[in-house]
Amino acid sequence: MIAPAKPELVTVNIDGKEIAVPKGMNVIEAARQVGVDVPHYCYHPKLTIVGNCRMCLIEMGMPAVDPATKAPVMDPATGKQKINWIPRPQIGCATNASAGLHIRTQTPQVKDCREGVMEFLLINHPLDCPICDQAGECKLQEQSTGYGRGYSRFIEQKNVKPKRTLLGPRVMLDDERCILCSRCIRFAKEIAKDDVLGFIDRGSYSTLTCYPGKKLENNYSLNTVDICPVGALTSTDFRFKMRVWFLKQTNSIDPESSVGANTVAWSREGVIYRLTPRRNDEVNDTWMADSGRVLYKAVTAADRLTAVKVNGADSALDIAVHAAGELFKSAAGAVAIVGSGRSSVEEQFLTKKLATALSASTHLVSRVGPGDKILVSADRNPNVRGALVTGLIPALPAAQLTALGAAIDAGKVKTIISVGEDLFAAGLNATQLAKVAVVYLGTQANATSEAAKVVLPTLTVFEKSGTFVNQQFRLQKFLKVVPGASGATDDLVVLAKLVAATGGTVPSDLNPLWKVLAAEVPALGPVTFANLPETGLLLDATPWAALPFVEGETLHFKPAAQPAAVTA
Amino acid sequence: MAIIPLERKPLSLAERTYLPAILSGLKTTFARLLRPIETMEYPEQRPAIPPGYRGVPTLVKDPNGREKCVSCQLCEFVCPPKAIRITPGEIPADAPTAQVEKAPQAFDIDMLRCIYCGLCQEVCPEEAIFLQNQYSMSGYTRAEMVNHKDRLYELGGTLPDPHLKWDKKKAAAEHGNTH
């Protein structure tokens, strides 16, 4: 393996503290490393530098050298090399670390500069905080408290600008609040590759707007809301729903595709209000797709399964598990399991255990859609690789369940256990399903749950903890955000009960289950759920490197093998 | 501690008849009949409420009848016993007070939880919630003791508004310094 080239380290001095940082590193980031906050609006670590907010002004100096001899000029007072301070402030975001760079962020000049910039930014900023969705996570609020003057000298009338401009179906613009930092413009151009935003007019007339006839409607538009340092861009979905200071943040994973974007779910009292991206420089940087942000709605959707059913009648979990056990006995040797690429690694492991106990054939439903080369990959199952790692399936799933259909037609399968998969959608027809008894574990009602003999409601990804293996073979964990819906049971408990109905015993709690997983799955040997890092853990993918995965290239991911032709 | 047994003194003859005690009690009673009344006939009569009194929290409207609350939820946040519960809502763009944008859909104060501390009034940035003179709350059920938005406005009424900030905002927009 070739180690990446070590970056050249240079020593910089920030407020008297020496630190070695990679050459060329941004001063704001270098200061962050020594615990010095350089306030900023327009600077974003994942976007280009424009330096137009002027908030990050700092004093900068370099060690003095004699122009003729290049010998260091010593300061007789201190005995050290003299520092030539630039008399006027520089912006931190456009200053790169170089050897001997000296930075001062706490001098009276810097303080005056920050107060001046804050004063200008607040001149036309409306007093909207009580009605502004950004309040509580607003950089302008934080920095006017931290670095502002604390009173206003402005006695003239504030500008009035449009307050409810829809930039796109999901993004609302309040022009008065905009501080013209241009983060959204740079995001649309550089990350979303959909260059529709721009400023028009000059001075206090400046306005953010879309190109005439276009809208900000790409699948990444809501990232502009996340990076907006003020409340100018708001999400139409989250607008006026709840103040952010009430919301509890729980780490989660976007289950819409095998990218596995890291997310934060914001909930209050068992209700999820929004999903936002969580920074992971190896996976999704600080972005996520809009399509992944609405998935929390499945938790309270109208089609949510909340009643255990046996033969269509309401029942209790233990009775239903017993009924399922009877079905397994009557169809001994003729049971098939349709596992899911949406199940967590732990659930897939228990599904495998169940399959082994029943000597059942295992299948997986493939879900393929077009990849957008950013953060939605072609494989719309978040955890197909988990099924490979746990050994639930030996090879990649076929596009349709034709093999299972043929087995049913041949009379070799009498009972099917479906883990949240709609068998009709996966390619079985009604005649085939009429021939078999279906045990359905799932969260949402569909044609299969209607036809199933036993329905066992389970939890959505936001109601349980677990892990997914993303396209990079990175094991990432998601945590329980809200309590499970009434009537639904944790998938692990249901699967463990089904295994128990066949006479086996497996743990249904995550921590004891991970001991078994670590012991039995070679790739997961050193892992426990508790010590899995927040940024995930890259597993050894060598055993599966040659498989023709469907994913094409996305952010931070290049497929090892040529992607298979998209078949769905 | 040691226990000291005390001998109870035997009652005298006068005490055993109880008559002196009854008569002294009646003396107090009849003497009071002739003096001015010092108590108040509550609830027909009510005491004067001193300024600064913290009664039942209420929502108020401004002199133009606009509900002042914008559902910023700061009172809900600050409320120590968590008596306040707000569901925020949006004011439609065609409403006369559309410039305010936000108003509560529901505003509930559970008077069984409220401790009359007045922090909600103190924290309110819109001067919309006041603890006024109403002090008597009663009901037969727990549900009756929750003041909903309608009841809160009924209790609160209208108070003078020295700022009229949102009216100024609307005037500025109509005046046309929109460039």
Image: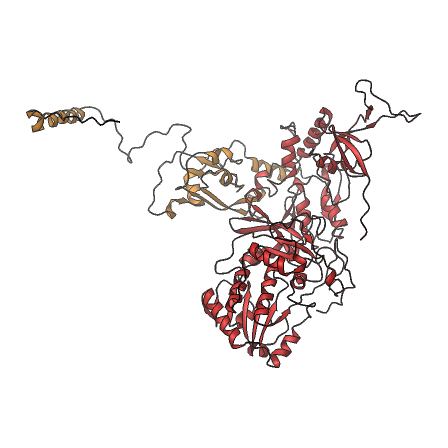
Q: Quadrant of residue A434?
A: bottom right
Q: Is residue A545 above or below residue A157?
A: below
Q: Is residue B27 above or below residue A201?
A: above
* Image location of residue A390, percent across then percent down: 64, 62
**Residue sitting at x 73%, y 55%:** A374
Q: Which chain is red?
A: A
* Image location of residue A502, percent across then percent down: 52, 69
Q: Quadrant of residue A380?
A: bottom right
* Image location of residue A463, percent across then percent down: 55, 55
- Kindly give the residue lying farthest to the right in the view shown: A68
| Colour pattern | by chain
- Kindly give the residue lying farthest to the top in the view shown: A77
* Image location of residue A37, percent across then percent down: 69, 34
Does residue A161 appear to the left or right of B106 in the view shown?
right
Is residue A440 in view from this perspective? Answer: yes
**Residue sitting at x 62%, y 28%:** A150
- Name the residue nearer the viewer: A242 or A98: A98
Is residue A422 in view from this perspective? Answer: no
- Name the residue nearer the viewer: A275 or A302: A275
**Residue sitting at x 44%, y 39%:** B81
Q: Is residue A266 above or below residue B131?
A: below
Instruction: Give the quarter of the figure containing the C terminus of chain A.
Output: bottom right
Does residue A309 appear to the left or right of A156 in the view shown?
left
- Name the residue nearer the viewer: A203 or A321: A321
- Kindly give the residue lying farthest to the bottom in the view shown: A410
Q: Which chain is orange?
A: B
Count numbered badges in the picture: 0
